[in-house]
Image (cartoon, rainbow, N blue to C red):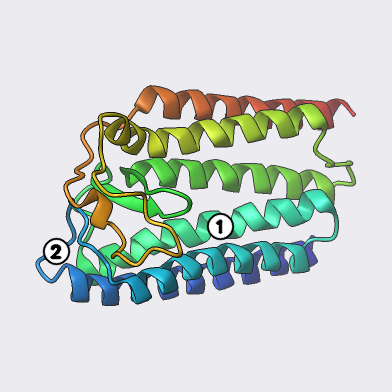
């Protein structure tokens, strides 16, 4: 038990450090593009910086997957450590933003969450709730594995976890999809090969309404999957 505690401690420290690095980059970007403070609509970002930012987000996910693979012993443990590091990184990203920029004003403040493959937007509290769910799943998996249980995630549990995750992601892109379906944007969607600035195609886009029903549906599926996982292990 001491070994796993030490491992989780270092994974936590690593993820907090990554959260600070993410915050530092965003602080620089906001100083350049949002000197008066971050707000929607999004300011177009130069093509070269947009490409770097897009690849940086991909590199961040690769790093988090990598640390999970290196730290975990089994496939389920590798996955658990990945989502744990992702969750800690995400939460402390907002903690450091609050400390350095006094932002967000509240947990209901809208944020741009991700760029791949389209902009994800939502109130800050939504990704934080997802992160807490990830931490709960990780701690359950690690606890039972240390007790000697087989914590391999079954196919039906994977399906539920995947369905819940995709539903939550849908809630983040829902407002953007609705915006596009109304005949926006006027320009083609930005891609890696685009010669125009990132966000130029949605320079008038201001999020209007977050679909909490879709989010709650996704969260319910995730929690149900975790409950099935825990109940099966206890019986097994």
Which quadrant: the N terminus? Answer: bottom right
Q: Which residue is mark 1?
A: 86
From the top left corner, tell me how far across and down residue 113 is, in percent.
38, 52
The quarter of the picture where the C terminus appears is top right
In the image, is residue 117 above or below residue 179?
Answer: below
User: What kind of element bears circle 1?
Assistant: helix
Q: Given contact means CB atoms under 8 Å apart, are the residues at marks 2 and 1 in contact?
A: no
Q: Quadrant of residue 35?
A: bottom left
Name the residue nearer the viewer: 80 or 50. Answer: 50
Front residue (pair 47, 99): 47
Q: Tell me the distance, in whole angstroms, between the alpha carbons under discs 2 and 1.
A: 26 Å
Q: Residue at x 49, y 23 (%)?
A: 217
Residue 127 placement (x, y as % from top left):
42, 45
Q: Which residue is mark 2?
A: 37
The reply, left or right, for residue 2 in relation to residue 172 is right
Q: Nearer the viewer, residue 185 or 127?
A: 185
- Residue 100 left/right relative to 117: left
Q: Which mark is residue 229?
A: none
Identify the residue at the far left of this view.
36
Q: Residue at x 62, y 30 (%)?
A: 163
Image quadrant of residue 206? Answer: top left
Neighbour tally class for label 2: few under 14, some 14-19, many 20 plus, Cα within 10 Å: few
Quadrant housing residue 141 = top right
- Residue 36 lies, with reference to residue 77, above or below; the image says below
Q: Residues within 10 Å of mark 1 (few under 14, many from 20)?
A: many
Q: Point out the tag, 2 or 1, that comes first from the N-terminus.
A: 2
- Left/right of residue 1 with respect to residue 36 in the rendered view: right
Q: Position of residue 184 (x, y in %)?
A: 25, 38
Q: Residue at x 82, y 33 (%)?
A: 154
């Amino acid at each position: 038990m001491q070994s796993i505690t030490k491992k989780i401690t270092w994974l936590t420290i690593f993820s907090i450090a990554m959260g600070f690095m993410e915050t530092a980059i965003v602080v620089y970007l906001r100083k350049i593009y949002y000197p008066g403070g971050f707000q929607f609509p999004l300011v177009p970002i130069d093509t070269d910086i947009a490409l770097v930012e897009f690849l940086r987000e991909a590199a961040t996910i690769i790093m988090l997957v990598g640390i999970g693979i290196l730290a975990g012993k089994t496939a389920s443990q590798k996955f658990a450590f990945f989502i744990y590091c992702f969750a800690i990184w995400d939460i402390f990203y907002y903690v450091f933003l609050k400390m350095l920029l006094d932002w967000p004003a509240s947990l209901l403040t809208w944020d741009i969450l991700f760029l791949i493959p389209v902009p994800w937007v939502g109130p800050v509290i939504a990704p934080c709730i997802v992160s807490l769910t990830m931490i709960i799943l990780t701690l359950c998996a690690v606890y039972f594995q240390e007790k000697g249980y087989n914590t391999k995630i079954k196919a039906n549990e994977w399906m539920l976890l995947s369905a819940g995750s995709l539903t939550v992601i849908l809630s983040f892109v829902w407002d953007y999809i609705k915006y596009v379906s109304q005949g926006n944007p006027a320009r083609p969607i930005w891609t890696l090969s685009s010669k125009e600035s990132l966000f130029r195609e949605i320079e008038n886009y201001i999020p209007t309404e977050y679909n909490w029903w879709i989010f709650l549906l996704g969260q319910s599926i995730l929690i149900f999957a975790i409950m099935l996982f825990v109940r099966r292990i206890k019986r097994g």
